[in-house]
Amino acid sequence: MVKVNVNGCDSFVKGAQYKEYVEKALKAYDTLQGEKGAGNDFLGWKTLPVDIDESLICEFEAIRDDWRSKGVNLVIAIGIGGSYLGAKCAIEALSHSFIEPQTKVVFAGNNLSEEYLAELLDLAKLRNVACVVISKSGTTTEPAVAFRIVKEYIEKTYGKKEASGRIVAITDAVKGALKTLSTQESYKTFVVPDNVGGRYSVLTPVGLLPIVLAGFDVRAMLKGAAAEREELLRKGEDNAAVKYAAMRNLLHTELGKAVEILVTYNPKFTYFAEWWKQLYGESEGKEGKGIYPASVTNTADLHSMGQFIQEGSRCMFETVINIEKANREMVIGSDEQNLDGLNFLAGQHVEHCNAMAQLGVKVAHIDGGVPQMEVSIERIDEANLGAAFYFFEFACGVSAYLLGINPFNQPGVEAYKKNMFALLRKPGYEKETEAILKRI
Ligand code: PA5
């Protein structure tokens, strides 16, 4: 269960103000739950934890087992934005930080770097490769470019027939170039439901298949998400999503805080912040509104961004992902000579030092004018990640409706594409090419 603590904001806001914003958040909660708000045809994510069929998970496991039986030890997951960040952050959070897994899942199609793709093929040549290509629209340029290159490599290396058994596509049920290509090449395909937007799709095949291929338990993840859904179904001022949405909007609107920094004290959660940034940035940043989502990984970033957060422009508040229990133990030893002067820590868990750093930063940042919220999960595992995914998605819906924004579209993402296509001389963009060349 996800818990939200707003007491680190007490010295910045008045009780009455918070009450007012809780009331606003409760109205936004009704809009989300009543399914009458803007973008209400994209609410399929709300019931995913209880809708996903067991047979689908069995299909994912069959692919995993088939590829393992062929000796596959590298899966290239191709996708961008919501078509990769969920799986990427879950796999980063759940994987050993240093030891390579039996099957490594790597990500491509999330950039247009030639060097990145060339180095990916360097790795592919050392491995036994399969690929999952993910694009809801089936037309996004970055994954399409990466897939053309990876597909060619797989076909050349394993033959065209074998290649079709080493490629799985996740896309729209009927439309898009990826769907057409998959049908023609007889790829196994899974569908991204029409009513689930990319950044809300981690609990669809988009996130679940790569997570299964990496060896993790998506049943536990869905169970954790379902339990969190049950929690959030209970409307009230103690509802965690209502508290989070109320406080972040209050800090933004009444105190002028323009930036929310998601803070983690575990490097395994660095990519979780990337997922969160996309979720909140793309959902709320519209019509000249929104809180700019940023992130830091402490304690590392206390030695880079810490100075700014402590004393720089007072534009931000922090939301700390508080992980209550560590999964591993490491106790600091005693040293007879004590040359490093650390014997005062002898017998202490490293995580205790981390917790004291977190507490010390909280007090220092509050003193420095940075309000702080905490969002707590018990530990890093599949169930807690599922709960965290569901919590932040739900809270994003409530928060955006409170702000008066449709959280489920992303009209601004198209703007750069027109210019890029014009500059790449894509057929049909001739007029735009002419216009843009005059400007650069
Ligand atoms: O949240 C979103 O809708 C976007 O970030 C998309 O996930 C991203 O643009 C990728 O789109 P697609 O899956 O259609 O390739």
Image (spheres, rainbow, N blue to C red):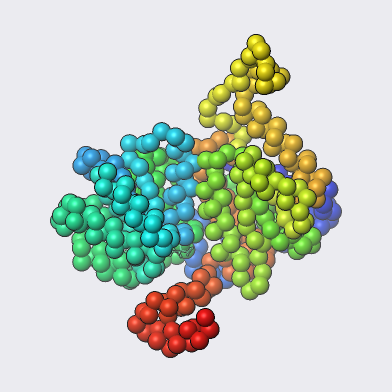
In the displayed structure image, the side of residue 219 where residue 121 appears, left or right: left
- Residue 73 visible to the viewer: yes
Q: Quadrant of residue 330?
A: top right
Give the x, y percent position of residue 51. Answer: 42, 53
For the residue pair 348 and 333, the one nearer the viewer reads as 333
Displayed-image quarter of ligand 1: bottom left
The residue shown at (47%, 54%) is 85
The residue shown at (34%, 82%) is 427
In the displayed structure image, the side of residue 372 where residue 395 appears, left or right: left
In the displayed structure image, the side of residue 157 where residue 8 appears, left or right: right
For the residue pair 251 and 147, the one nearer the viewer reads as 147
Q: Is residue 174 above or below residue 343?
A: below
The residue shown at (77%, 62%) is 256
Q: Is residue 381 above or below residue 425?
A: above
Q: Quadrant of residue 177?
A: bottom left
Give the x, y percent position of residue 238. Answer: 70, 47
For the residue pair 300 and 177, the one nearer the viewer reads as 300
- Residue 22 visible to the viewer: no
Total marks in image: 0
| Residue that sits furthest to the top in the current view | 336
Give the x, y percent position of residue 363. Answer: 78, 40
The residue shown at (57%, 64%) is 283
Q: Quadrant of the N terminus?
A: top right
For the residue pair 262 and 62, the one nearer the viewer reads as 262
Give the x, y percent position of residue 139. Answer: 37, 70
